[in-house]
Amino acid sequence: MEDDISKQDLGQCFADFQDIGGRFRDEKKELNNQMDQVFGFQSKYHHLHKMVYLSNKKDVDKVFEDVRYAVYNAARKMDNWGKAFPLKWILLEHLIEINKNAGKHFINFYDMSEMAKHPDINILKEEDLLLFLRFQHNWLADAFRCLVSDRVENSKLYHLEDWTWFKRHGKISELLITELFKSKDGIQIVGQTDNLNRVMEKLDILVKIENSSYYIMPSMMPSSTFDDVCAKFGIIDGKCKRTSWLCFKFEFLPPSFFNHLSAWFIRNYNPSKVDNDTALYRGICLFDIARSACEKILVTMSTDTIALQVVSFSAQQGFGSMCSDIYSKVKQLIEEIKEKYQVKISSKLHFKCSDGDYYKDTFEYDTLTNNQECFCPQHQTAHLSEQIYSPWMDNEVCF
């Protein structure tokens, strides 16, 4: 009888152990399925190199050691890996942290220079101090967080007209910026408002509206659908002429990339307007190319594509060199953004017929130049290749 009990306990033990393994396999499979559903065919899925499954109840130290090693391998591939930085930087960072804990969140350059001259730190040259400051980004992140955070404790701001403009249109006044800074960190950050605004302009976080006290914040522009924008601004077949779509198709496209692009367009073109509604939306923007507003440039994006289309309400025929000039500028702009922010992404040039969906079944430029016509799956017909790409490529030389 005792043997039977022992065998039963032993069998139960193995059964439980096998069940645990089965549950883990099921959970692992479920997590993998969820990842696959979220990312699907998105190119960013290829950036997922390793998955480590952790539990805060059962995992042994070896599993966490595997995570540390994975982080180490990723870190060593960064540009700054292995570069020697002075140990005195640690002392200066510690001194800055002491000031922050004492409530001093902003330090001007003169005071920073005096701190760096501390006998234990001894950073005397201005260029050495500037090199150190290049790696201190938290202050800018804190300032930006003041503008985009939902946790605004000062309820008086909700009744300001400027607050309504900001929340509905992404348009923010200098007054509201000051009030938001004041509500977060008091007078210290307010004293640095002008400097912060200039830095945020340089980084395309803010875009100054010419001859006004207002800015546009691309990341806070309202959302809308492509169809709604087209209907609102009259971009409907038969009402205007439309070029083919010029598409920059990326392997991986960060959403912030479009913010930099839209910031450039806001600085160089006037946003289109209808009934005081400005055509600046998150991921969709429309701009007047000339003062007559008869020709407009539609700029939009999808998961992996930035697309442009010129539309014309003019009675005159043709677009001239307008499209190819825009293409040349945008192509250069994309390279400048990649270089400025050290974004390592690549894109290929694609096109789509004028009334087609820019985000699917596009034609690669090389395919168009090597074939007189191409079949369009969306319209179930063939398009002449030259009619698709020629409006944009007048300045390009084909071989």
Image (tube, rainbow, N blue to C red):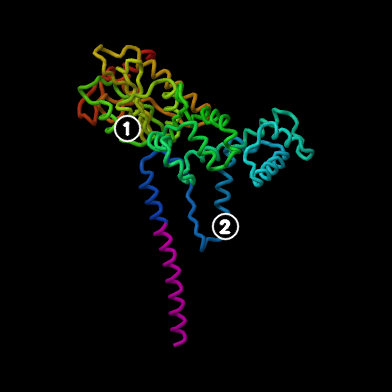
Q: Main secondary structure of the magenta part?
A: helix
Residue annotated with mark 1:
359
For this orientation, the residue located farthest to the right is: 119
- Residue type at mark 2: give it: Lys
Instruction: Report if residue 307 is visible in the image.
Output: no
Binning the other alpha carbons within 10 Å of mark 2 as few (below 14), some (14 to 19) or many (20 upward) gives few
Please tell me whether mark 1 or mark 2 is closer to you in this view: 1
Magenta residues, start to end: 1-27
Looking at marks 1 and 2 on the same chain, the residue that comes earlier in the sequence is marked by 2
**How far apart are the two marked residues, 1 and 2, measured between alpha carbons?**
45 Å
Quarter the N terminus occupies = bottom left
Residue annotated with mark 2:
62
For this orientation, the residue located farthest to the bottom is: 1
Residue 24: say if magenta.
Answer: yes
Q: Nearer the viewer, residue 231 or 24?
A: 231
x, y (%) of residue 326? 39, 18
**Residue at image coords 43%, 61%:** 24
Quadrant for residue 60, please give it. bottom right
x, y (%) of residue 341? 52, 30
